[in-house]
Image: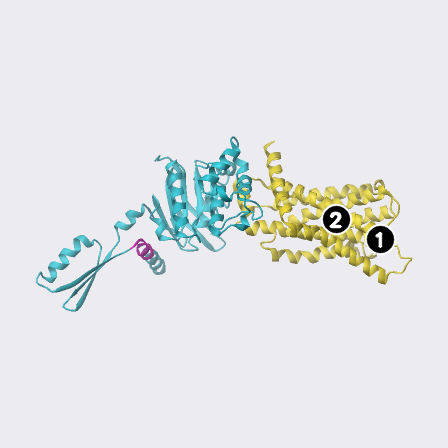
Amino acid sequence: MSTAESITAQDLNKHFGRIKALKKINLTIDSGQIYGLLGPNGAGKTTLIRLLIGATKPTSGKLSVLGYDPVKQKTLVRSQIGYMPQSPALYEDLTARENIRFFGYPHLNKNFSKRIEEVITFVGLNKRANDQVYKFSGGMKQRVSLACALVHQPKILFLDEPTTGIDPQLRETFWQHFRDLASQGVTILVSTHQMSEAMYCDRLAILHEGTLLADEPPHQLLWNKKARIKILRDNQINEELVSNYPQALPILLQQFGLDTNINRIEIEEETLETVVLSMMEDQETSEGSN
Amino acid sequence: MAMIKRIGVMTARVLNQLRRDRRFIAISILFPLIIIYFIKVVFDVLAPPSFNISAYIVPYAAFIVHFIAFILTAIVLVRERTAGTMAQMFVSGYRQIEIIIGYLLAYTVLATLQSLLVLLELNWLFDLGFSAVQMESMYLVMWLLAVISMAIGMLVSNFARNEGQVFPFIPLVILSVILSGIIVPVDKLPEWAQVLGYLTPLYYANEILQELIRGGTLMDSKLNLLILPVYGLVVVGMVAISLREKD
């Protein structure tokens, strides 16, 4: 994996009237990384992506995509990025192949037809490439949408909730595609509100109400997780919330004494979901107290 | 060169969609023809035999073409916005002017067919008795008006966030029937209304058509004939300025 920076944002703010959609965002994304943007609806994920693709201007702050300003050097940026919107933006009267050809045309030069066939194979559309898109299921439309974003071999791929509304099997296939692309050096910025997907990312940013709460590898986020230990002894339940349960458990047992009649020990570790939710709650509490 | 190619791809895409959207073709081609047929029925019942029908029916038909071309273009373009395909075109590297010209060229094919069929129907139903040159001249005027109507439809679509927001613009187009002199001569209107009339393309189209109906030629309406394409270019310029990726 190369470590060159693909995307940087410095003190990025975006306001829509009184609404502060993004507040002082700072982030750096390295080439070839799968960078996850995790957050609930309205957290600012789509706004951040739209800023990075130059579809909207920042209120203040600096942005760089592959070394270019996405607003002032829009054409240069767009020739090297692919964007897959939240809901597939396709012409339903046209076939999958026609859609891919149309959206890929402005940035495709050599081996145009060959590249279209390659991308059709990559997303597994060979058998349905000549069917009109209105005949497709939601998952198939997402495949076409991904192919449209990929066809011109972008260096960065922006995926706005790409797996929303598709079945688990196809979701797994999509993530396999993303991993394949990242291994080829493509930087992927993917937004999601599905915790299960967040673990697939090399790095994870947690956005909540326009604020970046964390920006680190997902396993690092889990290092700080807590665990609830329930010990049932003499028909009484003792509960403890501890930060590091492998260390805490022997100490707890020692406190009870080895001759104690322990019936059961339950250990309930925090999941990424609970870690993220508690971070969001902490932020809300601190904002409320300020 | 690259821009011309992209315009070509855009035009081909829109034409390809039109070819497959039979309902859209039916509405844009058949509706004007059906409305004109019913106008014929009304004239047959109400108008006295000595009534000079051409002075009314030709501009009425021009208005119908104007109205349908306007509304269909506006709705199709708004649909591009609501479906997200407009934004996707921008992200994919198409520029405003390529989108506008691509659409106009494709829809001009439709307008060419639409104006031709309307004029042929008029001649058949009302037995207008014009010469071939007069008919060709009228066709040119109607065609120009249809293309301008599409540009106006594109302009309106830039100010509407959904299909429903196109509808408040419809009364403006209907008002142009009164202001353009089709029903009442413009000089009989209050002065402020006359000024408004000059803002509608239908006024210039009607002036030329009336001259042709009276037996004149296009050369007799040189100024109005020049104003129509200029009007169209100004509208296209306004479309280019207002067509933006929105916040």
Q: Measured from the top left, where is residue B115 in percent x and y?
A: 75, 47
Residue A81 is at least partly visible in this image: no
Find numbered disc 2 in the image and state the secondary structure of the residue it sits on: helix
- Classify residue A8 as left or right of residue B29: left
* Chain letter matching colour yellow: B
* Chain letter matching colour cyan: A
Total numbered badges shown on the rendered structure? 2
Quarter in which the C terminus of chain A is drawn? bottom left
Magenta stretch: includes residue A273: yes
Camera-nearest residue between B67 and A134: A134
Q: Amino acid at mark 1?
A: Phe
Between disc 2 and disc 1, the foreground one is 1
Q: In the rendered image, which residue does mark 2 sit on?
A: B201
Chain of the residue displaying label 1: B
Q: Amino acid at mark 2?
A: Pro
Q: Are marks 2 and 1 on the same chain?
A: yes
Chain of the residue displaying label 2: B
Q: Which residues are magenta?
A: A271-279
Quarter in which the N terminus of chain A is drawn? top left
Residue B126, labelled with which disc?
1
Q: CA distance from mark 2 to mark 1?
A: 25 Å
Magenta stretch: includes residue A100: no
